[in-house]
Image (cartoon, rainbow, N blue to C red):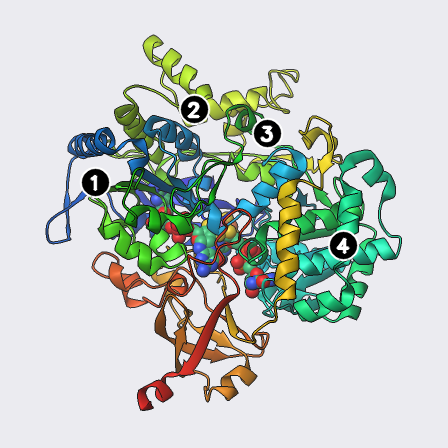
């Protein structure tokens, strides 16, 4: 028997796992007690990695859809040849933009795939690239791009040292952090409280994190921008702002200060449903704490003011003098500093082009996904006629998934690179399954740059890759070669691929990561060899290397020419105007729908593993007792949930954890259509929250999907039948 230590790649937390392996069977998985970051923590999903690996329904060979809509195996060679012929024919006829590309969330956990995205895009030459970013962190990235001059200048809460954690629209006790890699958030928050620290959670639902909090502030969905800006206003009025910091490091404070004047406490209290006294008290406590950090995530990033609300979080931190200070929002020093490369390679950028039909702007090369269905449906020059999906399930993850489901049927050709046949990939003509993570090595290029401590780690494969298996990056490299006519990648990969092949060297993502590591801040190119890191040293350190607490300072991460943080970029001022207009509109009192994550779900997948779906049905609508009573609903009843896009049935849970007027449904369910290929998921189908979310309602600044605060109505099913 073999023991292998490996980082979990299912979410952002980078927990260390220990696998017991015999041949190609994984016999046991447990938390790695010695992992430098997670120190013996893992959640049930990580433990279930072996079940995913051994899932008989996971695809092991390429599949081709037949006329009956079922799938037959096809060889890799035939699959690649078919892909090349069909896609290139469409491209020749209709141009590059006729090929759409959607890449999904698991790509972020796969260093090989991540490095190849740019290459494939460049080979395809298409502007119709989409991703899960418009349902996720794009407002965070755009905020960083305009504030600091780089989308990779992302402040991360110094969670282990803070005295005050203001958590807005995030549920890290369940998610284990997002844009904040922090395994065992519950343990870290408890430790903070034990040190005398304070946890305040702003959420329309008394979430698992809110239950742990010293104070839960229940807010009306979609209004966090106003709340946070009002807090900044409180600091101004009480003279609690860090004048010296503002004078030395920012541009545009006078303009912002002027605009804050319109956001009076009374007006904001009315709009947010949070008492003026509460706003004032929390703001002052935030300013008075020895150290403090405001942090916001999905609840804020997928609301109607997503960009302004993300900006307001940073503004609050900046104005209170918290940025780059221990216990505040700090900048990790990644051992793999890809930010410089990202900037130089032209990855970073926003609104350089817009979608053809809806005119929505790109973010870092991706158009907002609510535009995908209309780009497929609407005839004309640049219409998407073929689509490649990589590790994504947009039918379940994008607003108005039902419309996208229908639109995919209208494509001439579709390729999905995925490990399952599911709601999205069942539409593909070709499904190309990678070997999946456990058969490949792993380096965390992305989340190492977002962790609450600086760490470096390499993970070996847990099982051997079989001769007929390909990793995601190998599939992408082959497609890149066939569509681009040669090894054409990102400019910086380009020369490497071109230069290495003729001299008999094989490019690998880990080889590339080694180079980045060696040239990086801890690398052996700059530090004396005995101290400096390289991949060989990481290989010899199976539990990872702790590189210490986050380092103070922020100026090294500000990339504007004037070296200042730009508070007054036009994009933020437009967002202020939009908030002002919204606040002037009367609220209509309709129910609104928000989302919910659960510990044993990973977005839309993982539901084919019995251990992750056992027990009580989880895909249920949570509703406040007052709202339930008004509608004659009791716990366990069936209700009809209706929005502009969809009407369907849901089981209700009556719970005072909800704010009155707000109902909550988890996303990532609705597996009815996958039942032929995923037996377990099919038996626990549930419904898809994104059938009810609306592709027409996007945040106007960057075209972000609005997944929280969607207007709905709820009626008891019994009444619908009677009527
Ligand atoms: N209503 C609502 N909608 C949401 C959200 C919400 O909170 N509410 N959250 C949004 C967020 S934050 C995200 S990130 C998105 C996710 O949205 P997507 O990225 O579109 O979808 P996922 O559910 O992550 O599906 C991942 C797909 O990748 C496959 N897969 C898993 N591992 C691998 C691998 O190693 N290689 C390959 N090739 N495929 C793999 C799985 O089988 C699955 O099909 O959902 C978003 N949608
Ligand atoms: N177990 C588990 N872990 C995961 C995932 C998973 O699917 N399951 N997904 C991973 C991914 S891809 C991501 S992006 C992260 C997301 O990580 P988080 O952002 O921490 O996760 P969410 O549960 O979406 O948290 C959003 C919270 O915002 C609240 N909310 C909704 N609307 C509003 C609003 O208008 N204002 C405020 N203030 N709050 C609001 C919701 O009630 C919810 O508690 O989690 C990651 N980790
Ligand atoms: S918290 Fe995330 S990284 Fe940790 S074991 Fe669970 S799924 Fe894996
Ligand atoms: Mo996400």
Helix, strand or loop status at disc 2: loop
Ligand 1 within 8 angstroms of badge 1 C-beta: no
Q: Is residue 271 left or right of residue 178?
A: right
Read off the residue under disc 2: 490
Q: Which residue sits at x=59%, y=49%?
A: 307
Read off the residue under disc 4: 260
* Cα distance between the residues tagged 4 and 3: 39 Å
Read off the residue under disc 3: 335
Estimate the x, y position of residue 17 in percent, counting from the top left: 48, 46
Helix, strand or loop status at disc 3: loop
Q: Do the residues labelled 2 and 3 touch (CB within 8 Å)?
A: no
Q: Quadrant of residue 192?
A: bottom right
Q: Quadrant of residue 533?
A: top right
Estimate the x, y position of residue 458 in percent, counting from the top left: 50, 33
Read off the residue under disc 1: 62
For the residues carrying marks 1 and 3, which lies nearer the camera in this image?
1
Q: Are marks 2 and 1 in contact (CB under 8 Å)?
A: no
């Amino acid at each position: 028997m073999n023991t292998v230590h490996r980082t979990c790649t299912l979410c952002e937390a980078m927990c260390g796992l220990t696998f017991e392996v015999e041949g190609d069977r994984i016999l046991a998985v447990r938390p790695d007690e010695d992992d430098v970051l997670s120190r013996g923590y893992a959640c049930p999903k990580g433990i279930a990695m072996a079940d995913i690996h051994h899932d008989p329904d996971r695809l092991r060979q390429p599949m081709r859809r037949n006329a009956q809509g079922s799938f037959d195996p096809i060889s890799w060679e035939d699959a690649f040849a078919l892909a090349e012929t069909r896609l290139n024919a469409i491209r020749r006829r209709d141009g590059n933009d006729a090929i759409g590309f959607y890449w999904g969330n698991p790509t972020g956990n796969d260093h090989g795939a991540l490095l190849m995205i740019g290459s494939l895009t460049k080979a395809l030459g298409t502007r119709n690239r989409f991703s899960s970013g418009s349902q996720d962190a794009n407002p965070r990235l755009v905020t960083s791009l305009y504030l600091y001059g780089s989308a990779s200048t992302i402040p991360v809460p110094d969670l282990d040292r803070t005295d005050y954690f203001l958590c807005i629209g995030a549920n890290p006790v369940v998610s284990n952090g997002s844009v904040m890699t922090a395994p065992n958030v519950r343990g870290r928050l408890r430790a903070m409280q034990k040190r005398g620290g304070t946890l305040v959670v702003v959420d329309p639902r008394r979430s698992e994190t809110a239950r742990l909090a010293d104070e839960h502030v229940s807010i009306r969905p979609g209004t966090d921008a106003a709340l946070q800006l009002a807090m900044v206003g409180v600091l101004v009025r009480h003279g609690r702002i860090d004048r010296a910091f503002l004078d030395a490091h920012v541009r545009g404070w006078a303009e912002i200060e002027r605009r804050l004047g319109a956001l009076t406490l009374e007006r904001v209290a009315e709009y947010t449903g949070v008492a003026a006294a509460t706003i004032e008290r929390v703001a002052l406590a935030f300013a008075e704490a020895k150290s403090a950090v405001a942090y916001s995530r999905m609840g804020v990033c997928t609301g109607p003011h997503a960009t302004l609300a993300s900006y307001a979080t940073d503004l609050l931190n900046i104005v209170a003098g918290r940025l780059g200070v221990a216990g505040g929002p700090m900048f990790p020093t990644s051992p793999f500093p890809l930010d410089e490369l990202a900037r130089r390679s032209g990855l970073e950028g926003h609104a350089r082009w817009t979608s053809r039909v809806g005119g929505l702007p790109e973010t870092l090369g991706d158009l907002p996904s609510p535009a995908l269905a209309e780009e497929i449906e609407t005839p004309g020059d640049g219409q998407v006629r073929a689509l490649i999906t990589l590790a994504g399930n947009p039918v379940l993850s994008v607003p108005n998934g039902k419309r996208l489901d229908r639109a995919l049927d209208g494509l001439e050709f579709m390729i999905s690179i995925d490990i399952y046949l599911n709601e999205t990939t069942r539409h593909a003509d070709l499904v190309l399954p990678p070997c999946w993570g456990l058969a490949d090595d792993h380096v965390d290029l992305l989340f190492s740059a977002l962790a609450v401590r600086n760490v470096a780690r390499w993970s070996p494969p847990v099982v051997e890759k079989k001769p007929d298996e390909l990793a995601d990056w190998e599939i992408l490299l082959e497609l890149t070669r066939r569509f681009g006519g040669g090894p054409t990648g990102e400019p910086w990969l380009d020369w490497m691929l071109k230069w290495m092949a003729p001299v008999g060297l094989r490019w690998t993502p880990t080889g590339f990561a080694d180079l980045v590591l060696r040239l990086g801040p801890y690398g052996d190119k700059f530090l004396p060899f005995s101290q400096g890191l390289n991949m060989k040293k990481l290989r010899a350190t199976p539990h990872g290397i702790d590189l210490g607490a986050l380092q103070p300072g922020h100026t090294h991460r500000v990339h504007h020419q004037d070296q200042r943080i730009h508070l007054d970029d036009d994009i933020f001022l437009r967002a202020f105007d939009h908030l002002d207009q919204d606040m002037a509109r009367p609220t209509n009192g309709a129910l609104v729908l928000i989302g919910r994550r659960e510990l044993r779900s990973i977005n839309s997948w993982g539901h084919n593993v019995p251990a992750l779906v056992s027990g009580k049905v989880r895909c249920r609508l949570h509703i406040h007792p007052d709202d339930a009573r008004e509608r004659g609903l009791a716990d366990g009843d069936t209700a009809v949930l209706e929005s502009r896009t969809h009407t369907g049935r849901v089981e209700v849970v009556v719970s005072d954890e909800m704010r009155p007027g707000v109902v909550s449904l988890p996303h990532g369910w609705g597996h009815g259509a996958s039942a032929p290929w995923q037996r377990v998921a099919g038996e626990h189908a549930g419904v898809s929250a994104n059938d009810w979310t609306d592709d027409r309602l996007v945040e106007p600044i960057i075209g972000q999907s609005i997944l929280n605060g969607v207007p709905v109505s709820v009626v008891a099913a019994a009444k619908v039948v009677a009527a």
